[in-house]
Structure formats: structure tokens, C-alpha cells
Image (cartoon, grey):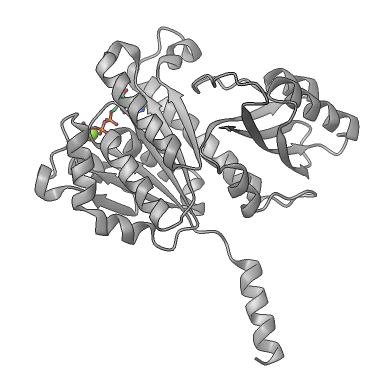
Amino acid sequence: MSKSQSEMMFALAEDRVPNILLVGIGGCGCSAVEIMMHSAIAEKVTLAAINTDQRELKLTKAPVQIPIGEVLTKGLGAGSMPHVGEQSARESIQGLEALIQGADLVITVSAGGGGTGTGATSVLLEVCEQLRVPTIAFIVRPFSFEGKRRLVLADTLIERCRNLAGTTFVLENAKLQQALGADVRLDDALEAANHYINELVSGLLATIDSEAIARIDFAHLLSVLSGHGVGRGSVIEAEDSESIIEKITDFPLLQDAQSLEDDDSITKILMHIWAPESFTLADYAEINEALHEQLSSYADLTSGFSVWDTPSFRVVLFVNQISK
Ligand SMILES: Nc1nc2c(ncn2[C@@H]2O[C@H](COP(=O)(O)OP(=O)(O)OP(=O)(O)O)[C@@H](O)[C@H]2O)c(=O)[nH]1
Ligand SMILES: [Mg+2]
């Protein structure tokens, strides 16, 4: 190989951006993708929507739309039957394989409790596992007033995801009322949960995207968010570093993690801080200590740091708690 050829290959490797695929599955997943279509995420990842319900699918305007189970459901939905969602995904397995092929990371968004999300999400995650593509799953857990059946179905899906995905984040619809007040309209509440997922995914992408003094690369991100753990995350805007510490382990819409002793679990943390120039090593040490105190004294922390010309702070935090 000539010198110029090898230089060119090196340049290509340096410039390669990870191919991230975000897939919304079922009604909730499609609504989340629809929100992302109007956010900066649309330029950074490939957005795809999967559904048995073709009307819901088309509403997303996602660049990649995959109808599943067209023979089984005739495009009319899975009627809250998870086995129909699952069989639909199996009927369309070749389309799912073609979708995943070549991705460096797949992020799924879906709700448990209905037919399509509950049945098809784990089939997609299985395909990713077979093709050795890392995964992160965001699962929405229904409101308790929707009845026990939906909650049990959601919990079965969450259990499956925990065995298949690198990290599983569980959003509780039940926490929306607490976070937004009792008078919130139902459609606004559902949308707020989807915006929250949008914010977390944007935060995650920002950690690897920034011009940083200490940079987190894509391989760091994958290593923190692997191991079949329970995920929690937050994006904090704060005026000073004390306010960061107050808010840092507040995960408003996410399911509470089981409290495990350090001996029973491994906690991995990914954090990126954008701070003004005045930020000191002492401030940084204090944030790190607060994290260890509130999450785990043995936590494995990967952190990035950027200085920006804004007087306030922004912190993106992801925690992955893995049972030993
Ligand atoms: N946060 C949020 N939750 C939603 C949204 N849409 C539905 N849900 C919740 O998700 C659960 C499952 O609903 P869908 O995602 O529409 O169900 P599906 O997977 O399309 O299932 P089928 O329609 O039966 O095929 C519901 O019981 C709601 O609790 C949404 O846009 N945002
Ligand atoms: Mg549906």
C-alpha cells in the first residue's frame, strides 16, 4: 500500500461516525419517533418506525418505516395481543434483519402493555443480539389505572429486555401526574414522556459529540451501557455546582432502581459536564464525590468535560446498575 493510500485509510477511520439507529415500535414508539423527527436527533441518527398498525406508522413520517405482520394483521394493529405483535415481527424478520445490518448501536423505544410493543420489541432485540449489535432499550410502563393486565405484560417485557439489551431504561407513565401536576391533559402528559426520552437520547449523543477537554468516545459509551443493567439518566441545567449536586440523582420519570448493596451489583456511570471557565478542580471533585455517595462508592465512572462560554452548567448523567 502506498503512503498516500494508508494516510487516506487512517483519515477515513478517524472520521467515521457511528451508525446509530433509533427504532420506535408500536404506538408509543411511533409517537416518540415523531417527536424526534422535529428535533436535532433526526440529523444524528437514523430514525425508524415499526408497527402492525399502518395508519399509526405513516403518521410518523419517519424516513424508515417498516410494517410488520402484514399477512397476519392486514395492517390493522395487534389488538393488544402480544402474541400477535411477536408473530408479526417473526413474519417480517427479514425486514428487521436488513434494518439492523450495519448498525453500530440500536436504541429501541416502545411501551409494554399493548400488542405490538410488548410482542415485537424483544424479537428485534434478539435480532440485534444475533447480529452482535449493541442495544439500549427505553420501555414505557403504562399508568396503573389502565389495569393490572397491562402492567403485568409490561413487566414481562421489561424482564425480557433486561436479558437482551445492554441497558434498559424504564419510564413510568404513573410518575407523569406527580411530575406535571394533576390537571395536565392526557395527550400533553403522554407527549411529555416522549420529550423526556428525546432529551435523554440527545444528552447521550452530546456526550460523544462535543469538542471536549476530556472526551468520551463511542467505545466508552458502549462499555458503560452494556452488561444487561438497569439504566437511569438525566440532563441537568444548573446555575452553579451546588445545584448540580442537589439535582444529580433525581430521575423524575424513571422507575426507581432496586437498592442493591455494592457487593451485589456493579454500577457504571457516564457523565459529561459543560462548565464555564471558572469551574475548578474542587468543584469537579465535589460532584464526583456526591455521585459516589448517592449511587455507589465503587462506581466505575467515565467522565467527559468541556468548557463553554456560557455562565451556567449542563450535566448529562447515565447510570447503569448491573446485578452480579
Ligand atoms: N408516554 C407515552 N405512553 C404511551 C404513548 N402511547 C401509548 N402509551 C402507553 O403505552 C401503552 C401501550 O400502548 P401502545 O404503544 O399504543 O401499544 P402498541 O404497542 O401499539 O400495541 P397494539 O396497538 O395493541 O398493537 C399504553 O397502555 C399507554 O400506557 C405515548 O405516546 N407516550
Ligand atoms: Mg398500536
Q: Nearer the viewer, residue 61 or 117?
A: 117
**Rendered location of residue 167, percent (x, y):** 51, 38
Q: Quadrant of the N terminus?
A: bottom right
Q: Nearer the viewer, residue 127 or 56?
A: 127
Which quadrant holds residue 311? top right
**Rendered location of residue 182, percent (x, y):** 42, 7
Numbered circles on residues, count: 0
Which quadrant holds residue 275? top right
Q: Nearer the viewer, residue 152 or 137?
A: 152
**Rendered location of residue 107, percent (x, y):** 45, 45
Q: Residue at x 26, y 37 (%)?
A: 119
- Left or right: 75 as drawn, with respect to 210: left
Q: Residue at x 85, y 30 (%)?
A: 285
**Rendered location of residue 78, percent (x, y):** 17, 36
Q: Residue at x 26, y 52 (%)?
A: 66
Which quadrant holds residue 53? top left
Q: Is residue 126 above or below residue 99?
A: above
Q: Residue at x 78, y 30 (%)?
A: 288
- Left or right: 185 as drawn, with respect to 275: left
Q: Is residue 263 above or below residue 163?
A: above
- Left or right: 3 as drawn, with respect to 71: right
Instruction: Find the residue positioned furthest to the bottom.
Output: 2
- Left or right: 38 as drawn, with respect to 214: left
Q: Is residue 156 above or below residue 259?
A: below
